[in-house]
Image: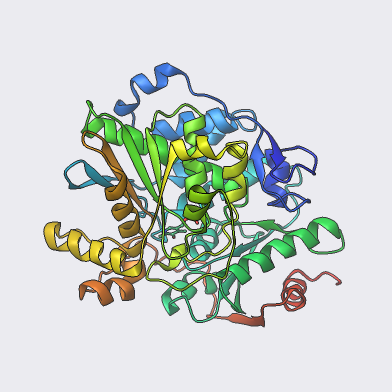
Amino acid sequence: MILHSTNRSAPQVTLPQAAACGIAPDGGLYLPDSLPRLPKAFFNNISEMSLREIAYVVANTLFGDLASSGDLKRVVDDALDFPIPLVPVSEGRFVLELFHGPTHSFKDVGSRFMAGLLPLVSSDGTAGRNIIVATSGDSGGAVADGFRRAASTRVFVLFPKGILTRGQVELFATLRNVVAVEVDGNFDDCQSLALDALGESLRDPSRPRLTSGNSVNPARQLPSIIYYFHAYASALRENPDTEGVVISVPCGNLGNLSAGLMAKKMGLPVKRFVAANNANDEFVEYLRTGGFRPRKALMTLARAMDVGNPSNIARIIDLYDGCLERLRGDVDGCSLTDDQIARTMRGVYGSTGYILEPQGAAAFRALDFSLRPGETGIALAGAAPGLFADAVEGVLGIRPQLSRSDQQSGGRQPFRVEKIPATQSALQRVLNTYTNTKS
Ligand SMILES: *Cc1c(COP(=O)(O)O)cnc(C)c1O
């Protein structure tokens, strides 16, 4: 696989090189030059294939030039040791539960996949790796957990002050190879600090070598492509005579949606996607007007979607060569107020007893706006309701619990957090302290 930078002023690289840097030196995101198409025969019997069987095929198609199929099978088996069920909710409408992994968010698969893939494709197996990840809640725990068995990899998790629950912070802050960094700012501040630190480490070889654990890193983002093949297969199993499968995606940093659009480029016959935004609707506005105006994120009920400057929009624009008309043909946009999200949660719970977390509810409502008779709709739910227990309790009056799948005690350290202002110099001091390099 050869990748180019979305800013088009950096050399092309291989996936191992892209994975080691996270972003391109010109500040762009790495995107495969071309995406391999899956043969038609694959789709003829996809509805009879298991999640893992589908994942083997997709992983071999994407990464077969980098690792043996035996190695890739092990990566898939480790990353996907839990189900991704399609749950019927109402007539023609389903929820795909992407959250049965160890940290209860869809970020588990990409994080575990990246952790499994890196040692297979790295040229310098010796050097201890440093990963930096900005989180609004779920990425931190997922990436930290994904790398918990990679003892020589250090994970710096940047999170905004006052947003995460104590439980979310504990998920990563107590892991031995994790440095938890509380930033006096919002998610976008964390993301730009992380991206700037990556840029610094690319420019200045005396700095600690860093790569990104966010979806800007193709090694974490590309594995999400697997969901969409599995979603499609599951929908066909339920509705073999469907007039088309429509997949609605709750959008934050647009990592997940961009993976869906890549799946379509690989031949997946999804009829259309729906991009659900909350009040932070820069992407929906882009679909409507063609103008992209990043701005300060607003706080909403669907916190994981509170992103004012979604980095993966660069990949989406590049995938469509900037052609808004073609993108509009593939993606419907829909932005939702907190009130609409809450009413959807209450409506679905009241009529079916099914609990949606706020992001999943946004996707479900957006699906409603877009779906036409005869089509099969799938809303992606990226987190267990128990991860958003306060928000769910505030809306539904019941407190969802988390299953106790992630209570392994090995590799834990006492709770410890570094607190910094949102400045690059403060971050560099923390990075230097933990990587023992001269500044
Ligand atoms: C991360 C996350 C999202 C947003 O996904 P992106 O890939 O950043 O667009 C939506 N819902 C939940 C629960 C998440 O954790």
Q: Give the vertical position of 334 relative to 43 (above or below).
A: below
* Residue 143: x %, y % from top left: 54, 59
Q: Would residue 122 be visible to someone looking at this image?
A: no
Q: Residue at left 54%, top 40%?
A: 324
Residue 110 locus on image (x, y percent):
51, 49
Q: Against 176, is 36 above or below? A: above
Q: Residue at x 73, y 71 (%)?
A: 431
Q: Quadrant of the N terminus?
A: top right
Residue 169 horizontal side relative to residue 201, left or right? left
- Which quadrant of the figure contains the C terminus? bottom right
Q: Give me the residue at 29% from left, 64% from top.
A: 340
Residue 6 occupies quadrant: top right
> x, y (%) of residue 217?
63, 50
343 or 401: which is nearer to us?
343
Is residue 341 shown to the viewer in this render?
A: yes
Instruction: Classify residue 113 as left or right of residue 42.
Output: right
Front one among 362 and 226: 362
